Image (tube, rainbow, N blue to C red):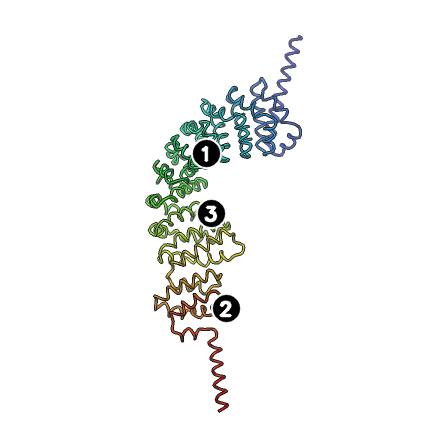
């Protein structure tokens, strides 16, 4: 009887521990309970349960601590201060697969908040154990470990380098080749987090053979996997010509362009980012995108997208157009200008308007034909309005000013320039317009008459006589294209001079 009573007592103690730790883990799911759990001292009570002799209690304790740490950086800091990390790391190499997953989750929850907390996880000796977990047979353990390593590496280059030095990259590449979709996704995400910081880190990912296994997954129909794969390829390609050529060499074109039509918005955005990061480096890579039908696909994409999703497509067109007049002409020929002008007019965010203004400038800056194509859309007036709007950001004003300067400098289509002359423009912009008008009129006899009939010449004379005007030099160049009598006739003071002359004649006649 005595033995049974003792055993029952211990069984009841075990059941209560199980019930307690399970209840806390469940309550920690709800953010509303976090503060109450913290005030009740949950963390101090959970810590010894990490070393409990019952595996399910250990697992639930790690899970509860992870959920607490996941809630805020203060609670994650408390996990570090309570010296819980060394226990978790120790258990990663000793316990069953379920506990390893829970321990990795807790480490991830701490590491995600800041570089300092991620460094605390590394300082606890977690990297070697996490890398070892990537070699486990169980896919769940690999997944939990890869996820944690990705969070650590994502903060900055120094932390990512430590992950690389621990030997994680080749094992992450092996994880990409595993059959489990969720493991593929998380391994691709972790490789992306490593590659994004510096060319050297991206090269380490490439050297491990990642691209040849990531590239074929572009055509996989799982949306989440496509997102991560496209993101990883863009993070590799962005750094240098050589790395972009490695990505292109994996035969992602034209397959990546089909992703621009995929139903998932993030897949479309990340695939557009891949195209942008490839096209920006050299004319040859931009031509490769054009040759594979990339411009038409990008135009369709920005026509159908809104908000930040449009940004990589808009910038990709700008990079392509920047290299040569032939490439810019291909952008115009694929009817890119209407959706770009639409974005300039409709998008509420200044950074999107800035990118669009920059792209329009890159398209219009090559030849008079390019400039006329841009001007014919009516976007110059919009650029002027944005440049002079006090609510516009400094970057937007700068981009609009530069775009106007590059387009107007090539614009020889007089009606487009004439339309600007009749607008209330900032003096700096008007000076550019008038200087270009002077250049055009000097070589265009028919244009000179047209400029008079439209009222342009009269408008110019009024600008020159405005108090404090800095446009006199530009106006004089325009005036030099006309006979002196015509210039006088359209001068604002001409009518006054005639009246004075009449009065003078009348006075002379009376005296006589």
Residue wearing tag 2: 466
Alpha carbon of mark 2 to alpha carbon of mark 3: how far? Answer: 44 Å
Residue at screen point 42% across, 73% down: 487
- CB within 8 Å, label 1 to label 2: no
Task: Tell me residue 357's x, y (percent).
Answer: 44, 52
Whichever of callouts 3 and 1 sits on the residue coming sooner in the sequence is 1
Task: Tell me residue 273's x, y (percent).
Answer: 42, 42
In this picture, residue 177 sits left or right of residue 75: left
In this rendered view, identify the residue nearer to me: 295 or 29. 295
Label 3 packing within 10 angstroms: few (<14), some (14-19), many (20+): few
Label 1 packing within 10 angstroms: few (<14), some (14-19), many (20+): many
Res 306 label: 3
Is residue 289 shown above or below 97?
below
- CB within 8 Å, label 3 to label 1: no
Label 2 packing within 10 angstroms: few (<14), some (14-19), many (20+): few
Q: Point out the frontmost of discs 2 and 3.
A: 2
Residue at screen point 52% across, 28% down: 122
Residue wearing tag 1: 194
Task: Tell me residue 353's x, y (percent).
Answer: 47, 51
Asked whether residue 65 is in view, the answer is yes
Q: Secondary structure at mark 3?
A: loop
Q: Secondary structure at mark 2?
A: loop
Q: Quadrant of residue 459?
A: bottom left
Asked whether residue 102 is in view, the answer is no
Is residue 474 shown above or below 252?
below
Is residue 268 shown above or below 507?
above
């Amino acid at each position: 009887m005595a033995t049974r009573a003792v055993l029952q007592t211990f069984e009841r103690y075990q059941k209560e521990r199980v019930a307690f730790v399970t209840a806390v883990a469940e309550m920690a799911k709800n953010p509303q309970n976090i503060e109450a759990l913290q005030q009740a001292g949950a963390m101090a009570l959970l810590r010894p349960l990490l070393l409990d002799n019952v595996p399910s209690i250990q697992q639930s304790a790690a899970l509860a601590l992870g959920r607490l740490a996941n809630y805020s950086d203060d609670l994650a800091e408390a996990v570090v201060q309570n010296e819980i990390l060394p226990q978790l790391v120790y258990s990663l190499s000793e316990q069953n697969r379920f506990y390893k997953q829970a321990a990795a989750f807790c480490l991830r929850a701490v590491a995600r908040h800041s570089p300092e907390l991620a460094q605390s996880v590394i300082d606890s000796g977690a990297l070697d154990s996490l890398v070892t977990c990537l070699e486990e047979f169980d896919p769940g353990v690999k997944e939990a470990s890869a996820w944690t390593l990705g969070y650590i590496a994502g903060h900055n280059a120094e932390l990512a380098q430590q992950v690389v030095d621990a030997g994680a990259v080749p094992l992450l590449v092996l994880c990409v080749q595993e059959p489990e979709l969720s493991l593929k996704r998380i391994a691709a995400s972790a490789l992306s987090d490593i590659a994004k910081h510096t060319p050297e880190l991206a090269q380490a990912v490439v050297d491990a053979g990642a691209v040849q296994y990531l590239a074929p997954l572009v055509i996989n129909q799982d949306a989440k996997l496509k997102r991560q794969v496209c993101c990883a390829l863009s993070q590799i390609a962005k750094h240098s010509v050589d790395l972009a050529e490695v990505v292109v060499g994996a035969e992602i074109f034209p397959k990546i362009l089909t992703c621009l039509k995929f139903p998932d918005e993030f897949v479309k955005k990340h695939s557009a980012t891949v195209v942008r990061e490839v096209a920006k480096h050299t004319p040859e890579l931009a031509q490769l995108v054009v040759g594979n039908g990339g411009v038409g696909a990008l135009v369709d994409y920005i026509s159908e997208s809104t908000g930040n999703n449009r940004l990589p497509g808009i910038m990709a067109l700008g990079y392509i157009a920047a290299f040569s007049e032939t490439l810019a002409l291909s952008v115009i020929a694929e009817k890119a200008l209407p959706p770009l002008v639409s974005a300039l007019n409709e998008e509420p965010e200044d950074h999107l308007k800035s990118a669009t203004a920059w792209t329009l400038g890159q398209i219009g800056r090559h030849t008079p034909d390019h400039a006329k194509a841009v001007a014919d859309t009516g976007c110059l007036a919009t650029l002027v309005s944005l440049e002079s709007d006090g609510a516009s950001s400094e970057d937007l004003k700068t981009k609009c000013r530069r775009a106007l300067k590059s387009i107007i400098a090539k614009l020889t289509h007089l009606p487009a320039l004439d339309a600007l002359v009749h607008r209330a423009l900032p003096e700096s912009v008007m000076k550019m317009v008038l200087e270009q008008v002077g250049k055009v009129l000097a070589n265009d006899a028919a244009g000179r008459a047209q400029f008079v009939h439209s009222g342009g010449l009269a408008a110019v004379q009024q600008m020159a006589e405005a108090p404090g005007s800095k446009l006199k030099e530009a106006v004089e160049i325009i005036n030099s294209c006309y006979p002196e009598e015509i210039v006088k006739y359209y001068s604002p003071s001409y009518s006054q001079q005639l009246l004075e002359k009449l009065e003078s004649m009348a006075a002379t006649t009376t005296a006589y």
